Amino acid sequence: MKVLVIGGGGREHAVIKSLKKNPTITQLYALPGNGGIARDAICVDISAKDVDGAVSFAVQNKIDYVVVTPDDPLVLGMVDAMNNAGIACFGPNKAAAIIEGSKAFSKNLMKKYNIPTATYEVFSDEAKALAYLETVSLPIVIKADGLALGKGVIIAETLDDAKQAVHSMMSDKIFGSSGDNVVIEEFLTGPEVSVLAFTDGKTLVPMVSSMDHKRALDGDKGLNTGGMGTIAPNPYYTNQIAQQCMETIFLPTMHAMNAEGRTFKGCLYFGLMLTPNGPKVIEYNCRFGDPETQVVLPLLESDLLTIMQAVTNETLDQVEVKFSNGSACCVVVASQGYPQSYQKGYEITIDESVQDNVFVAGAKAVEGKLVNSGGRVLGVTATADTLPQAIAKAYENVEKVHFANAYCRKDIGQKALKVVLEEN
Ligand code: AMP
Ligand code: GLY
C-alpha cells in the first residue's frame, strides 16, 4: 500500500515514524518532507499548500491513502480535492476545517451550542473594536480571525497595548487578511491542556492528553513560539476532568459540527484551559498539534493507519485505540534567535542511538549533510514508565544531537512534575 503524508515538520516526522510500523505500507511519501524525514519516507519537492500539485502527484503515483496534516492545505480544501480524484484521505474537508480556519466561526459555534469558552465579541470594523476596548477589563485577549502561524494572539495588559494590537491587525495587516476580522475575548487563567481526538463524526476517541510549552525561554518567559516542548500525559488532566470535557466540550463539538452540516472527520485538537469555573476551550485546531504529536504518537500502542482508515470509513467505533500507561517528553532544539531572526545552514549531527527518538522539523539535506533551515530544528523525545524518567531521558538524548547556535528550554515538564510530585 502506498501512503502519502502532506507536510514537512516534526509533527509529520512523528506521523511518518508511527505509520512506518504498519507492515502493509510498502511505500511512504512526504510532500515536501524535509532532510530528516528523508530517512523514513521518499520526499518530493511539492509544497504542502500546492493542492493541485499534490493531487496530480497522488494520481500519477497511484497513492492509496493520503494523510493531510498541516492547517493550510486542510483549510484550502486538499481533502475535498483528493476525494474528488478518488483518493481516500485522513483529515477534515474544507467545510469542517473552518473550525480552525476562522476563530469567528469557532467562537460563534461555541456560543450557539453552549460549549464553554471565553466570552468574546467579533469585529470587522476597527473603530467599533477600539470603542469596545474602552469598556473591557484588563488584561484582554485580541485574536486575528484567520490562520497566523499560531502567532495571531496578543494578550494586552494595558488599554494602549490592546488598541495597538487591534490597529496592527486591522490596519497594518501584520497577519495579512487573517486580521480583517478580530476576536476580542476575556482573559482566562488556569493550567492549559491539549487534547487531540480521533473522530469520524459518529464516535470521538480522545488521545492521551499533553502539555505544550509555548514561550521561548525557561519559566514561561520570552516570546510566544510554535511550541518549545511537550509532555504527555498532562497531570492536571484528571479522569474526572477528562469525563467533564467529554460531556461538555468534545461530544457537543462533534454534534455541533454535524448539526451545521460540517461533519468533522480527522484529528480534532482541543486547546483547553482548566479555569476556576471549569474547563474551557481556548482554541480548536483541525489537525494534530505540533509538538504535541511528538509525545502523543510514541505512546500509541494501536496501529495508526488502521485508526486513520477507520476514521475515513466511519468505523472508528470498531477499532481499538490504545495508549501505553507510560509518559513521554519532547524537547525542541531550536536555532538561537528563534522565534525572531536566526542563522541557517549549520550542520546537524544526530547520534545513531537516538535516531528513532528525534523528529526533524526545520532541517534540509545539502550535499549529503543535514543542515538547519528553520527555527525549531529537532524534537528530541523519550518515553518511559514515569514522567520524571521521560524528562530525564529526553534531556540525555538532547546531549546526542548537535549543531552550532542550538538552544532549548531546560525546564520542559517541570510544571507538570510539580503536580506529579504533589500527588505522590
Ligand atoms: P492560541 O494561538 O489560540 O492557542 O493562543 C496562544 C496562547 O495564548 C494560548 O496557548 C494561551 O496561553 C493564550 N491565550 C489564548 N486565549 C486566551 C485567553 N482567552 N485567556 C488567556 N490566555 C489565552
Ligand atoms: N502546539 C499548538 C499547535 O499545534 O497549534
Image: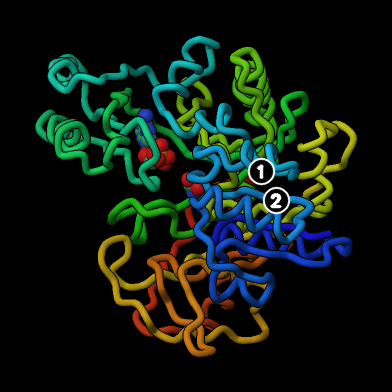
Q: Which corner quadrant of the image does residue 162 belong to?
A: top left
Q: Which residue in the rendered view is the most extreme toward the left?
A: 160
Q: Which residue is drawn at 21% across and 20% down?
A: 137
Q: Which residue is drawn at 32% across and 23% down?
A: 186
- Residues 396 and 152: in front is 152
Q: Quadrant of the N terminus?
A: bottom right
Q: Which residue is drawn at 77% across and 57% down?
A: 62
Q: Which corner quadrant of the image does residue 142 belong to?
A: top left
The alpha-carbon separation of the residues under discs 2 and 1 comes to 8 Å
Q: Is residue 322 left or right of residue 138?
A: right
- In the displayed structure, would residue 375 be above or below residue 235? below
Q: Earlier in the sequence, mark 2 or mark 1?
A: 2
Q: Name the residue under label 2.
A: 66
- In the displayed structure, would residue 123 be above or below residue 86? above
Q: Is residue 173 left or right of residue 391?
A: left
Amino acid type at image mark 2: Val
- In the displayed structure, would residue 146 be above or below residue 58? above
For label 2, count other residues whose C-alpha is less than 10 Å away and answer few (under 14), some (14-19) or many (20+).
Answer: many
- Residues 305 and 121: in front is 305
Q: Is mark 1 on a helix, strand or loop?
A: helix
Residue 262, percent from left and from top = 61, 22
Q: Which residue is drawn at 70% across and 36% down?
A: 206
Residue 265, percent from left and from top = 68, 33
Residue 117, percent from left and from top = 46, 21
Q: What element carries label 2?
A: strand
Marks 2,1: beta carbons within 8 A: yes
Q: Which corner quadrant of the image does residue 53 belong to?
A: bottom right
Amino acid type at image mark 1: Met
Q: Mark 1 points at which residue?
A: 82
